[in-house]
Amino acid sequence: MPSATIPKQITPEQAADALREQLGDGYKITPQGNDGLTVKHGALSFATVRLDQEGTNTTFQVHGGGLIITRLVNELGIARTVTEAIKESLGSEPPSPPSPPEPSSPPSS
């Protein structure tokens, strides 16, 4: 299951608007309850998106929809596409800073 963490509070409406802009007219985005979206791209290609608010972060859990085979295809297809669109349009969490280098021992003479 693909997911993306965005370092700010995002409402489902904001996420839907960002996805519409990023994915274009070929995708239909509809709200589902207070914390979810459905993204459709054709009759059998769809994904569900759940938003989890954690402090100042919003985590998006994206699942491909369908039954058995179509769910697997959608998990590898539209779910990944939607996750990448979320990251690109809303900005994913910055990577952790690199660890400082280990001190090296002085050269022996």
Image: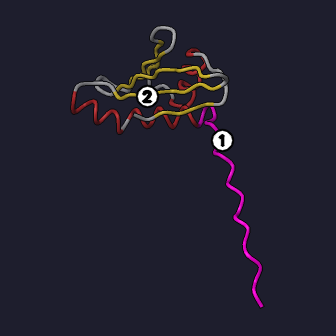
Q: Which residue is mark 1?
A: 94
Gap in Å between the C-alphas at discs 1 and 2? 20 Å
- Point out which mark residue 62 bears: 2
Res 53 → quadrant = top right
Question: Magenta part mainly helix, strand or loop?
Answer: loop
Q: Residue 89's spot in the image, x, y percent?
A: 60, 32
Q: Residue 52's spot in the image, x, y percent?
A: 53, 21
Give the crowd class for mark 2: few <14, some 14-19, many >=20 residues within 10 Å: many
What residue do we see at 47% from left, 20% from top?
Answer: 50
Q: From the viewer's perspective, is 77 left or right of 105?
A: left
63 w.r.t. 88: above or below:
above
Q: Residue 81's spot in the image, x, y percent?
A: 45, 36
* Residue type (three-letter) at the residue carrying disc 1: Pro
The magenta span reads: 88-109
At mark 1, the secondary structure is: loop
In the displayed image of the protein, which residue is found farthest to the left? 68
What residue do we see at 57% from left, 35% from top?
Answer: 87
What residue do we see at 51% from left, 37% from top?
Answer: 84
What residue do we see at 47% from left, 19% from top?
Answer: 29
Q: Residue 4's spot in the image, x, y percent?
A: 53, 33
